[in-house]
Image (spheres, rainbow, N blue to C red):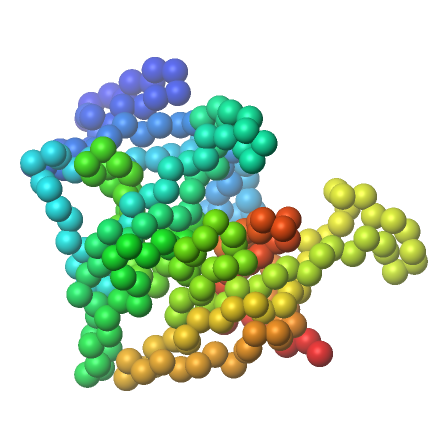
Amino acid sequence: MAAAHFTGSLISSRNLLPSFNGLRPSSVKFSPSVAHARVGGLANRSFTGLVVRAATVVAPKYTSIKPLGDRVLVKIKEAEEKTDGGILLPSTAQTRPQGGEVVAVGEGKTIGNTKVEASVKTGAQVVYSKYAGTELEFNGSNHLILKEDDIVGILETDDAKDLQPLNDRVLIKVAEAEEKTAGGLLLTEGSKEKPSIGTVIAVGPGHLDEEGKRKPLTVAVGNNVMYSKYAGNEFKGKDGSDYIALRASDLIAVLS
């Protein structure tokens, strides 16, 4: 077995991964940020400097990619290089984007006797789950090929509150953390418990049943809900408010 050579923060995968005609594995890079891993029933552990990114490079002789089934090809949005105040960010501080433009869609899937087409179209700006899909380098740009169900919603603006959830997902505006204890003591920022309560501001069309028909969700816009603590994808709105998009199955209760 070929030895792996470590040079600085770069590990070459040239001798570790098989090479295919037209597809070659790119380097596996470790950037100096913090990654969190969960293995089996073990608690979260922090590993400084461990962020693995291994995109498959598509050779220039291939000029198009056609996703199969219910998969979608997304051109990943470039990471922000500056803060809102115009401060230039180093590459290690740039937030990895979770959105991009749909550039190709598969033919859909069949459920029962029903053919179901993808609910997103070419050109749509979408947000997807953080660890979904397979990364590709194609035509000099970063792409992601993923299942349509891993797309959280459509976002045609740059404000999270405008997200249109897909399938069985809902968008919630998170309630603000309590400023005081029950006894009236002021809480510091570090001691404020993150709430798992919020108000539904948008809902998806519902999930598909065994016959491929849409089943509307049982929650509606305006409902105050409680949800699982570690569920969903979190976003920060332009107004400074926190938002979370999650599946309806992660909702625990409706509050009134």
Name which quarter of the figure residue 128 lies in.
Answer: bottom left
Residue 212: x %, y % from top left: 28, 80
* Near-viewer residue (181 or 151): 151
Residue sitting at 57 percent across and 68 percent down? 201
Pick whichever, 222 or 4, lies toward us.
Answer: 222
Closer to the camera, 153 or 3? Answer: 153
Is residue 211 visible from the viewing direction of this image?
Answer: yes
Q: Position of residue 130 (x, y in %)?
A: 43, 49
Residue positioned 17% across, 65% down in the render? 107
Q: What's the residue at 50%, 59% (across, down)? A: 162
Decide which of 119, 58 is in the foreground and name it.
119
- The quarter of the rendered structure image containing the N terminus is top left
> Is 248 left or right of 23, judged from the image as shown?
right
Q: Is residue 224 above or below residue 190?
A: below
| Quadrant of res 256 | bottom right
At x 58% / y 57%, what residue is drawn?
243
Q: Quadrant of residue 224?
A: bottom right
